[in-house]
Image (tube, helix red, strand yellow):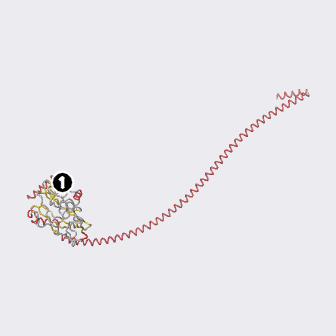
């Protein structure tokens, strides 16, 4: 009860004082005593394909720190990688942040756990579909157990190999999370598998694993596999074989479906092509009819234009004839006026001539009478009487 009260008070202090931004994973326990340094150990050979390395670490219980051996474990699903837990020193307390499975390896305090876990990221291997590819440069790989096609060699530069500190913070590893690690910490996580939890429980029940007993040198530093993982592996292999058979059948069915779809598509395409060909032919015929109608219309328009040109020419000729006629009429009118004027002039001249003739006749008559009077005086008197009568008239 005393220990539990100590855990509760310590955790309350951590929550009250605030946790730095690099503490993105759940805090499970906080204490004042620093964990021992990480012991050096040799990684066992990988027992088979699909296993991933979970590095050893110092956990804490009422009896103090105890060592959880490193082991090859099976992930809960393809594509998942293990982000180890880590101790973080802040405000006088050491806080434990649990590990988790996720698509990307997140922040684990900058602790160099070894064998691919250099303090930042993971260089022990990578997933290629549903197969895990192992980096021989940082892992112990037996090609008798693992197909050489799933092994590669990529040397890793490690800068803090001499620092065996097992915690982050003052006096330990001074590392802050990168932006990518913060993103991974906020992503979807899968907690430790039941086999991993059983592995931790076994370490806790083994008193020789406690630092108070082994003084930082545990008896069991690493294990090839953890309890129940071999049975799980056998079931997994059988499941994988069945999945491969199912996948093969699915592929065959998919190929048959694709072949059927392709044939159906071919049939549809042929039918569509025929319909398209018919539509194209119909369109071509309609285009030909339209072209013929357009030619006829063009010819009719040309004929109409020619007729309009002829009409326009005739109208121009008629206008010219009308103008010529108008000018002739004007000439005729002018001639008529001139003829009228000439006639009037002739009439006046005739009147003048007639007047002159009368005067001449009168003058002649007068001369004759005078001649007669001169020859016959009696006649002269008679003539004078006649003259007087004529004058009276």
Q: At 18% across and 54% down in the image, what residue appears? A: 20
Report the quarter where the C terminus lies. top right
Characterize the local packing of mark 1: few (<14), some (14-19) or many (20 or more) Cα atoms within 10 angstroms. Answer: few
Indicate whether 176 appears above or below 322.
below
* Residue receiving disc 1: 20
User: Tag 1's secondary structure?
Assistant: loop
Which quadrant is the N terminus positioned in? Answer: bottom left
Q: Is residue 315 above or below residue 62?
A: above
Q: Position of residue 176 (x, y in %)?
A: 20, 56
Left or right: residue 104 versus residue 87 is right
Instruction: Please provide percent x and percent y for residue 121.
Output: 22, 61
Q: Taking 185 as reference, is 322 left or right?
A: right
Residue 240 position within the rendered picture, expressed as x and y whole percent measured from the top left: 24, 71
- Asked where in the image residue 255 lies, by quadrant, the reply is bottom left
User: How many numbered markers are drawn?
Assistant: 1
Nearest the eye: 36 or 345: 36
């Amino acid at each position: 009860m005393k220990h539990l009260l100590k855990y509760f008070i310590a955790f309350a202090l951590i929550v009250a004082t605030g946790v730095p931004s690099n503490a993105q994973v759940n805090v499970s326990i906080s204490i004042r005593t620093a964990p021992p340094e990480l012991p050096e150990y040799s990684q066992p050979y990988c027992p088979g394909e699909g296993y991933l390395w979970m590095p050893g670490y110092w956990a804490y219980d009422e009896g103090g720190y105890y060592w959880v051996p490193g082991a090859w474990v099976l992930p809960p699903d393809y594509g998942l990688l293990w982000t180890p837990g880590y101790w973080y020193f802040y405000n006088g307390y050491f806080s434990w942040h649990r590990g988790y499975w996720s698509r990307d390896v997140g922040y684990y305090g900058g602790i160099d756990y070894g064998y691919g876990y250099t303090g930042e990221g993971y260089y022990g291997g990578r997933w290629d579909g549903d197969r895990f590819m192992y980096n021989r440069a940082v892992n112990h790989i037996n090609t008798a157990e693992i197909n050489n096609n799933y092994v590669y060699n990529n040397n890793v530069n490690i800068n803090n190999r001499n620092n065996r500190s097992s915690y982050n913070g003052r006096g330990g590893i001074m590392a802050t999370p990168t932006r990518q690690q913060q993103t991974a910490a906020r992503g979807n996580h899968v907690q430790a598998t039941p086999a991993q939890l059983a592995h931790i429980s076994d370490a806790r029940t083994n008193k020789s694993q406690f630092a108070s007993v082994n003084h930082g040198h545990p008896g069991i530093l690493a294990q090839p596999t953890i309890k129940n993982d071999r049975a799980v592996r056998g079931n997994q292999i059988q499941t994988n074989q069945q999945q491969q058979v199912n996948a093969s059948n699915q592929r065959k069915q998919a190929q048959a479906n694709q072949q059927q779809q392709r044939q159906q598509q071919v049939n549809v395409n042929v039918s569509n092509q025929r319909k398209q060909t018919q539509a194209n032919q119909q369109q071509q015929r309609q285009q030909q009819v339209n072209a013929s109608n357009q030619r006829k219309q063009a010819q009719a328009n040309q004929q109409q234009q020619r007729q309009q040109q002829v009409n326009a020419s005739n109208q121009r000729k008629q206008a010219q004839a009308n103008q010529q006629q108008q000018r002739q009429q004007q000439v005729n009118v002018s001639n008529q006026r001139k003829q009228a004027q000439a006639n009037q002039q002739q009439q006046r001249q005739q009147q003048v001539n007639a007047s002159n003739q009368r005067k001449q006749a009168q003058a002649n008559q007068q001369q004759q009478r005078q001649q007669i009077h001169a020859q016959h005086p009696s006649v002269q008197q008679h003539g004078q009487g006649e003259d007087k009568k004529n004058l009276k008239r």
